Amino acid sequence: MTSRSQILSGVDEAGRGCLAGPVVAAAVILPRENHLSGLTDSKRLTPSQREDLEHRIKAAASSWAIGISWPREIERINILQASLQAMLRAVDHLRYSPELVLVDGIHRLPGSIPSKCVKQGDRHVPAISAASILAKTFRDRLMVKLDKKYAGYGFGRHKGYATGEHLEGLHRLGPCLMHRQSFRPVREACSQETRQWLPGIYGEDEPEK
């Protein structure tokens, strides 16, 4: 049971299953009586629906914040712990300290912040749905920007997921700084004996084509 006066925050992440880019989390505190329609898991929405909801969430929220864990941290502490750290960072940057954090999934937040897991919370709990949407839209825009810096992989299209285009680019170019080298497809690309060029890692110029 939660008190009606209790400050609740929803948190969720985006990018956990990607081969490249950070994992991004969002934390959202919505008013008790919120009138946002259309909230659900961000993956069930079109890009235009997410963008429309993003603006409405930010306008309606009592507070919202973003937390990020970059590839080197993901490699060091594993993707689950990195996702939880990104969530903690988002919660820490909220304007108000929540008395309870509702977390999508089955893993509670580490540390002293009271948290409660909600299975499929991104579909059924408005604050978690809102966090899912903010995390997804922020990360998608970030991957578009990273696509300009690390060209050739198609980050702007697949957002770092293991699509055929991404795997082809990974094996053709080798991994860049945004790749998570603890993930098997990236490790396999690193270990190819014929690989001579690893652009973005050792600083060599790319070979002439």
Image: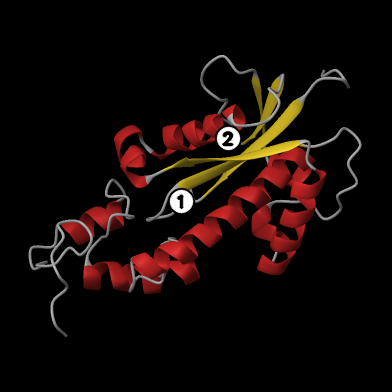
Residue at point 39%, 72% (across, down): 164
Q: Secondary structure at mark 1?
A: loop
- Where is residue 21 drawn, in percent x and y? 41, 54
Tell whether 183 sits left or right of 148: left
Which residue matches tag 2? 90
Asked if 169 appears above or below 175 in the picture, the reply is: below
Circle 1 packing at 10 Å, graded few (<14), some (14-19), many (20+), is few
Q: What x and y, as percent, mark residue 103?
A: 64, 32
The disc placed on residue 108 is none
Q: What residue sits 30% from the left and 35% below the top?
A: 76
* Dot 1 or dot 2, earlier in sequence: 1
Q: Position of residue 162 (x, y in %)?
A: 41, 62
| Closer-to-camera residue (60/173) | 60
Report the residue at 47% width, 61% height from top: 143
Q: Quadrant of residue 88?
A: top right
Rendering quarter of residue 141: bottom right
Which quadrant of the figure contains the N terminus? top right
Residue 90 in the figure: left or right of residue 82: right
Q: Residue furthest front?
A: 95
Quarter placement of the C terminus: bottom left
The kind of residue on which mark 2 rests is: Ala
Residue 48 appears in the picture as rendered: yes
Q: Where residue 108 sits in the image (x, y, percent)?
A: 57, 25
Amino acid type assigned to the residue bearing label 1 in the image: Gly
Q: Which residue is mark 1?
A: 17
Callout 2: few (<14), some (14-19), or many (20+) C-alpha neighbours within 10 Å? Answer: many
- In this rendering, the answer to whether 157 lies above or below 110 is below
Question: Is residue 109 toward the left or the right of residue 49 in the image?
Answer: left
Give above or below for 91 relative to 165.
Answer: above
Give the Cα distance between marks 1 and 2. Answer: 19 Å
Q: Nearer the viewer, mark 1 or mark 2?
A: 2
